[in-house]
Image (spheres, rainbow, N blue to C red):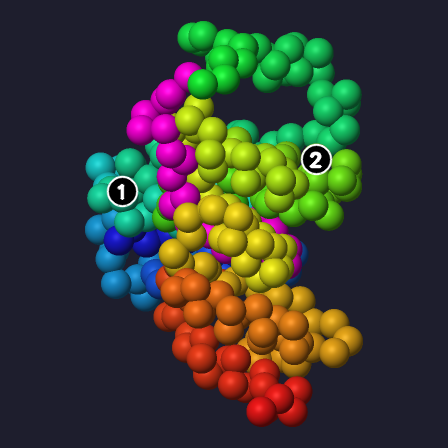
């Protein structure tokens, strides 16, 4: 696996390293070094060399720096001298760049390949909201129609085998956030992310923010439950692979009872509120949740309790029992 070194002015490297860990989980062979106001170029170079010396793989190293031409970049150039055939530097470090680097590490054998793979997402991650603030030429380019046929597909048109493919279904109070948009989307590779929620579908601002949060190349939709139950019967979605997001397990149960083919349900996070018992760091359940999960279990649904794909799954039966104990349910 390619080793990654983050080098920046001030504490930026350490901060974005923490951000990456929160969104993608802890990473091996990644280090962050900083240039402090009281330090000079030689101090930074010593830190960078020490960090690289601690990597298991010193043959393939990707150095991500904040500014082209800045001290971290210049020192990286000194360090890379003699290693140009294996090592690479990318300037303009931002969160999309780091997350894409993490996501692509398993697929890229070399630092050169990894460096090339992160540029598009790094650029696409720079957006302005409201959209009206974007320069006219940028907005126009973004709005340009894709090549190929456009327009609504006539009802009754059968695409693929006529059945939408549910590649993954997740319960997450936060719905589409960093871990979902990066980790899970990379692992699942869906065509569409569909948030199924009556509440969110009627909240224009929240709906728009979710659509804007979709990772590059994947469309995000927010639909009410009734629409989702129509989609699973619509033969026009036969070529679609979907990642479903539910705000509550009750929504997931309603979808399953309505005919949505979900055999495994990923339990990500359920926010704490009055009347709920925390059963781990990210899951809080009340009596209605316990009842819902037990009904889902009777329907044959399997539970995958993980925040990110790299996490080890937790035992849902034990978490439900912990909730019962905390709530005094026998």
Q: Which residues are magenta?
A: 157-177
Image point (61%, 32%), residue name: 126
**Residue 125 is inside the magenta segment:** no
What residue sits 73% from the left and 48% below the top? 199
**Residue 155 visible in this rendered orientation of the protein:** yes
Q: Nearer the viewer, residue 129 or 314?
A: 314
Q: In the rendered image, is residue 10 in sight?
A: no
Residue 127 is situated, as x and y percent measured from the top left of the image, at 65, 30
Q: Which mark is residue 300?
A: none
Q: Quadrant of the C terminus?
A: bottom right
Q: Is residue 158 above or below residue 222?
A: above
Query: Magenta stretch: dominant SS?
Result: loop
Local packing at callout 1 (Cα closer than 10 Å; few below 14, some 14-19, many 20+) is some
Which quadrant of the figure has residue 281? bottom right
The mark nearer the N terminus, 1 or 2, is 1
What crowding class fits label 2: few (fewer than 14 Cα within 10 Å), some (14-19), or many (20 or more)? some
Within the image, what quadrant is residue 132 found in?
top right
230 displayed left or right of 305:
right
Q: CA distance from mark 1 to mark 2?
A: 34 Å
Answer left or right for 117 relative to 130: left
Place of residue 308 in the rendered image (x, y in percent of width and height, measured from the top left): 45, 60
Q: Does 330 sit above or below residue 319?
A: below
Residue 208 is marked as 2
Residue 238 x/y as whole percent: 38, 29
Is label 2 in a helix, a strand or a loop? helix
Is 255 situated above or below 291? above
Viewer-side residue, 93 vs 164: 164
76 relative to 141, above or below: below
Identify the secondary structure beneath mark 1.
loop
**Mark linked to residue 108:** 1
């Amino acid at each position: 696996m390619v080793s990654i070194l983050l080098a920046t002015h001030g504490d930026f490297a350490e901060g974005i390293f923490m951000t990456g860990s929160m969104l993608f989980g802890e990473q091996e062979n990644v280090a962050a070094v900083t240039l402090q106001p009281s330090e000079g170029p030689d101090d930074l170079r010593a830190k960078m060399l020490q960090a690289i010396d601690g990597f298991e793989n010193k043959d393939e190293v990707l150095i991500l720096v904040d500014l082209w031409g800045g001290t971290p970049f210049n020192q990286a150039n000194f360090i890379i001298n003699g290693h140009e055939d294996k090592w690479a530097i990318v300037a303009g470090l931002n969160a999309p760049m780091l997350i894409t680097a993490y996501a692509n590490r398993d697929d890229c054998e070399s630092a050169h390949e990894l460096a090339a793979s992160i540029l598009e997402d790094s650029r696409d991650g720079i957006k302005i909201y409201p959209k009206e603030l974007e320069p006219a030429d940028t907005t126009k380019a973004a709005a340009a129609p894709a090549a190929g046929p456009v327009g609504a597909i006539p009802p009754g048109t059968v695409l693929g085998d006529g059945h939408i493919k549910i590649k993954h279904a997740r319960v997450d109070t936060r719905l589409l956030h960093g871990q979902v948009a990066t980790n899970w989307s990379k692992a699942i590779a869906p065509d569409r992310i569909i948030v199924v929620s009556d509440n969110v579908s009627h909240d224009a601002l929240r709906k728009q923010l979710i659509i804007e949060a979709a990772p590059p190349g994947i469309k995000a939709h927010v639909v009410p439950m009734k629409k989702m139950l129509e989609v699973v019967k619509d033969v026009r979605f036969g070529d679609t692979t979907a990642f479903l997001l539910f705000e509550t397990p009750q929504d997931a149960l309603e979808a399953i009872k309505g005919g949505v083919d979900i055999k495994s349900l990923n339990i990500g996070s359920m926010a704490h509120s009055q009347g709920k018992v925390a059963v781990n760091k990210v899951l809080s359940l009340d009596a209605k949740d316990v009842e819902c999960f037990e009904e889902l279990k009777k329907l044959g649904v399997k539970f995958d309790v993980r925040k990110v794909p790299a996490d080890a799954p937790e035992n849902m039966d034990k978490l439900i029992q912990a909730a019962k104990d905390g709530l005094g349910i026998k």
